[in-house]
Amino acid sequence: MNKLTQKALSLAESPFIHPARVLAVRTWEPDTMREIDLHLPDCDMSRWHSAQHIKFKVGNFIYRDYTPSGWDEETRTCTLIVVTAHNGPGSRWGRSLQAGDTVSYLGVDSSHEQPAPGKPLVFLGDETAIGHFLALQQLAGSGAEISGAVVLSEEHHRDEFGQYFTGWGLQSLRKSSSRDYGELEEWVSGLSMEKQRDAVFYLVGYSREVVRLRRLLKKKGVQVKARGFWN
């Protein structure tokens, strides 16, 4: 891309770009999982009645969507959980962030996914889904009945997950491959569906595996909401 084209694109995107400031960065061990606290001064979070996604600029004309969790509408702050284990632009961006940095985002949009009121919630996904599940938990409130399983690649991340989410009925499972949710299929196969008839299952993560899990659960006659994040 030549300099003239880059300048034209930059001018075209600039009216739609908003700033956010990095307040803090917390890393899991190993540091391929990061919690990033942000202040979004231009964002009205009082309208967040469903899980949102924010389109962050992670490189020159490169954007990635992340689900904010733990938001506070008065202070206009929220947290992102970013997986930085890969060498893509989103991972490199997440690894580079430090407290005090200014980042840019193109906009905030609703995923149109809300927790079913009064229903038990069952979450199934991998580490990329944790922020989305936290957003649904915040919307559901402290009295929500939450269970499910999350597959994580790193053993120590599974230990940290258990300490972090002590109030949830969520299990952490070993993920044998970044694109294989076989452990989640086994977990679903072992469920007593008679006890889950009133529950709503939320599937989030690698699109192909989410589709497979959705088919499996549909055969069992339960209500399913599915969202594929990456291909």
Image (tube, helix red, strand yellow):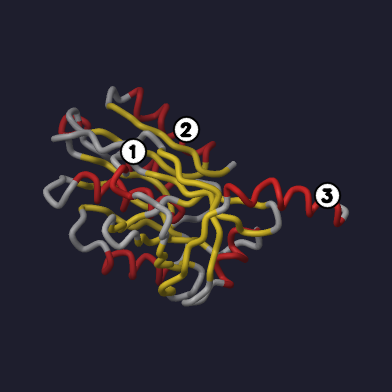
- Disc 1 to disc 2, how far (Cα)? 13 Å
* Placement of 22 over or under 8, stated as above or below: below
Which mark is nearer the camera, 1 or 3?
A: 3
Task: List x then y, in percent, for residue 107.
Answer: 50, 46
- Disc 3 to disc 2, how far (Cα)? 42 Å
Label 2 secondary element: helix
* Left or right, residue 219 beside residue 122: right
Task: List x then y, in percent, for residue 75.
Answer: 30, 63
* Left or right, residue 114 beside residue 19: left
Residue 5 is labelled as 3
Tell me, yes or no, whether the two marked residues, 1 and 2, touch with CB atoms within 8 Å. no
| Label 3 CA crowd tier, 10 Å (few <14, some 14–19, many 20+) | few
Query: In the rendered image, which residue does mark 2 sit on?
Result: 212
Give the amino acid type for the residue marked by disc 2 in the picture: Arg
Query: In the rendered image, which residue does mark 1 sit on?
Result: 202
Label 3 secondary element: helix
- On the question of residue 10 being in view, the answer is yes
Give me the residue at 35% from left, 32% from top. Answer: 225
Answer with mark 1 or mark 2, whichever residue precedes in sequence.
Answer: 1
Task: List x then y, in percent, for residue 218.
Answer: 35, 24
- Disc 1 to disc 3, how far (Cα)? 42 Å
* Left or right, residue 131 beside residue 60: left
* Placement of 26 over or under 158, stated as above or below: below
Give the amino acid type for the residue marked by disc 1 in the picture: Tyr
Which mark is nearer the camera, 3 or 2?
A: 3
